Image (cartoon, rainbow, N blue to C red):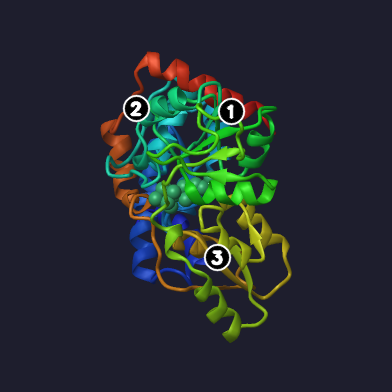
Amino acid sequence: MTADASQTYHLLRKKLHDVLPDFEIRAKAELACRINQLKGDLGAVILGHNYMEPGLYHSVPDYTGDSLELSRLAATTDGDPIVFCGVRFMAETAKILSPHKTVLIPSLEAGCSLAASITAEDVRELRERFPGVPVVTYVNTYADIKAESDVCCTSSNALAVIESFKTDTVIFLPDEYLARNVARESGKHIIFPTDRPIPGDKQDPHMDYQILGWHGKCEVHEKFNVEDIENVRRQFPDVVVLAHPECSPEVVEASDFSGSTSAMIRFVEQARSPRYLLLTECSMADNVAAENPDKEMLRLCSVRCPHMNQITLQDTLDSLLQNRYVVDVPEQIRLKAKRAVDRMLEIH
Ligand code: 13P
Ligand code: SF4
């Protein structure tokens, strides 16, 4: 092991000794060291989502954060190429905001069940059916969907984005649970369009709803249920339960706090309780545990996002070595999508 790799190993070991076995920390330190050297030589910047596995999360990103924070960073960073350790829709957002830079994603398999749940044609049909109703789309969508939208939002600003419209109704796509959670928080009435005529459709001017939703779901967060929380609370009455807003409204209601991935991280850092249950992707609980050794993170089981899981240190190294995989967004779509992303970034 070189002196630099040995230094990386000791830094990682200090953080991750309770989270990863020693042989894994050793192997990851060697890879991380090569990545960091190459990154410096190339002038690259690495952005890492909070769901990256602990070895990667704690060693190579120049910045870590939730979707909104990483979008803001992608717009302002000097590094080129930008290597996005996250999923494709996030890397596309970076390309939308930094068109002159090379944006790389280490794996082509890093998709998202929410992004896959809707097509641009679906959005156009909704617009035709509900003329004049603004379209808000979650950033967990591909660029062609963003291009059909008026504004994007993330889990940390969804409510502010919806409230920025002075209209009676908004279309909110594609996450059913996030839409229901926002409806609950804002006191708005939500419906889900069906093939049958519904009250409030363009034939009927008397709308009795304010949010029109879609049935997209996060395949990770839909797995949590209220029974899980009740069981853990029975065993550990002092546990503080945190749920991502992609969980069902019942789960969010039964939790003590709900917020974006970074909001959950900040909550644990600032709270004084000894024990937490994080209802979100399980690598994030590892990352939070490593940063807060005095606090206990309870696990229900290993609920890993299969898409985030595609991003490994080896693929990140190969991405830099081989300039792969380049993320491109056709210019016509990029310009339209940028309007929706810029509008989101203007809302605080
Ligand atoms: P955040 O915006 O909270 O980081 O969430 C992104 C995501 O994909 C959650 O599943
Ligand atoms: Fe998509 Fe869910 Fe994975 Fe986030 S956790 S990237 S929403 S599938």
State the separation of the CA atoms marked 1 and 2.
25 Å
Q: Residues within 10 Å of mark 3 (few under 14, many from 20)?
A: many
Q: Number of callouts in the render?
A: 3
Q: Quadrant of the N terminus?
A: bottom left
Along the line of sight, the residue nearer the viewer: 307 or 55: 307
Q: Quadrant of the C terminus?
A: top right
State the separation of the CA atoms marked 3 and 2.
36 Å
- Sooner in the amino-acid sequence: mark 3 or mark 2: 2
Q: Is mark 3 within 8 Å of ligand 1?
A: no
Is 291 located above or below residue 61 in the figure?
below
- As drawn, is 313 to the left or to the right of 40? left
Question: Which residue extends farthest bottom?
Answer: 235
- As drawn, is 329 to the left or to the right of 340? left
Residue at the image point whose x is 29% and y is 45% from the top: 315
Residue at the image point whose x is 34% and y is 18% from the top: 330
- Residue 278 bears which disc, if any? 3
Q: Would you say residue 4 is visible in this rendering?
A: no
Along the line of sight, the residue nearer the viewer: 327 or 192: 192
Q: Circle 1 sits in a helix, a strand or a loop, which is it?
A: loop
Q: Give the image location of residue 124, x and y in percent.
A: 40, 24
- Sooner in the amino-acid sequence: mark 1 or mark 2: 2
Q: Give the image location of residue 110, x and y in percent.
A: 33, 44
Q: Between label 3 and label 1, give the one nearer the viewer.
A: 1
Q: Amino acid type of disc 2?
A: Glu
Q: Which residue is mark 2?
A: 121
Q: Which residue is mark 1?
A: 205
Residue at the image point whose x is 42% and y is 72% from the top: 301
Q: Circle 2 sits in a helix, a strand or a loop, which is it?
A: helix
Q: Which quarter of the picture shows residue 39? A: top left
Along the line of sight, the residue nearer the viewer: 253 or 171: 171
Q: Give the image location of residue 205, x and y in percent.
A: 59, 28
Along the line of sight, the residue nearer the viewer: 182 or 126: 126
